[in-house]
Image (spheres, grey):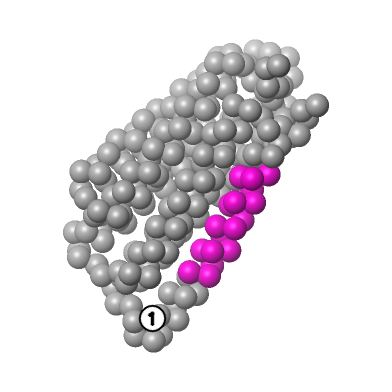
Amino acid sequence: MEPRRPGGLTRSLEASLHQACHQAIGMVEQARDGFRRLDGGTLDRVNESVVTLRAGAQSLTSGILSELGNRPGFEKQARLYLALPMHLERIADRGEALAAAIRKVKTAGLPFTEKARREVDSLMEATLEVLAALKDLVRTWSPVLATHVVEAGDRAEALTDEYAQSHRDRMIGGECVPMSSPVYLSILDHLSSIRRHAREMAMDLAPAAHSQP
């Protein structure tokens, strides 16, 4: 049986939303690889993915207005549907800022401790877990996946708070170079924002998932 999409969401719009989620995953994967290697070419590809994701979000907005704008009752659904591409654009914005922060690590030669590198890498992976679950939710509309996006996001936020506190402790203890601190914290913030927007998308879509028989 075909999964039950949210009321009014067409198959083509579902496909566009799914593709945009896939693009967001690719963007973060490239950012992760760019951080691991501090490679300028990989970071350039992050920016290319940002452009693609923004275009996908704008196309989704146009599709929503074109396919659903004249349907009865659309006004009641407009907040839900038009919020989705907005979240995708904010994810793209944060991806661009993330790449810029990582590039600064490379160009300024900012030292990160091995522990800080592991922390960033683990949050990159946690962000990818959230985005992957969101992408699968858009295809299956499984309430289990909707819950997983939220819970995985919550776990990653708790980890972010733990890492930020650990970083402050390292700063006090003189283990970290002060000039690296703002960039480290900005990377954590950009990843947190990406997850937050993905989480909000899942929460918006969760009623459709939970309406499955």
Question: Measured along the vertical axis of the image, is residue 120 above or below residue 93?
Answer: below
The residue at the far front in this view is 1
Q: Residue at x 28, y 50 (%)?
A: 34
Tell whether position 2 is magenta. no
Q: Position of residue 3 (x, y in %)?
A: 68, 22
Name which residue type carries label 1. Answer: Met
Q: Position of residue 27 (x, y in %)?
A: 38, 40
Q: Magenta: predominant secondary structure element?
A: helix
- Of the 4 image quadrants, the one containing the C terminus is top right
Q: Position of residue 16 (x, y in %)?
A: 50, 23
Q: Secondary structure at mark 1?
A: helix
Q: Is residue 136 left or right of residue 105?
A: right
Q: Is residue 59 left or right of residue 146?
A: left
Q: Residue at x 35, y 64 (%)?
A: 117
Q: Residue at x 66, y 40 (%)?
A: 146
Answer few, some or many: residues within 10 Å of disc 1's Cα (few below 14, many 20 plus, some between 14 and 19): some
Task: Choose between 93 and 127: the one closer to the eye.
Answer: 127
Q: Residue 206 falls in which quadrant of the image?
A: top right
Task: State the extent of the magenta-drawn residues as a range.
Answer: 147-163
The residue at the far right in this view is 213
Q: Report the number of numbered marks.
A: 1
Task: Choose between 92 and 12: the one closer to the eye.
Answer: 12
Q: Is residue 8 left or right of residue 185?
A: right
Q: Residue at x 54, y 34 (%)?
A: 135
Tell whether position 156 is magenta. yes
Task: Choose between 110 and 38: the one closer to the eye.
Answer: 38
Q: Which residue is mark 1?
A: 171
Question: Measured along the vertical axis of the image, is residue 155 above or below residue 53?
Answer: below
- Of the 4 image quadrants, the one containing the N terminus is top right
Q: Position of residue 38 (x, y in %)?
A: 24, 55
The residue at the far bottom in this view is 173
Question: Measured along the vertical axis of the image, is residue 121 above or below residue 139?
Answer: below
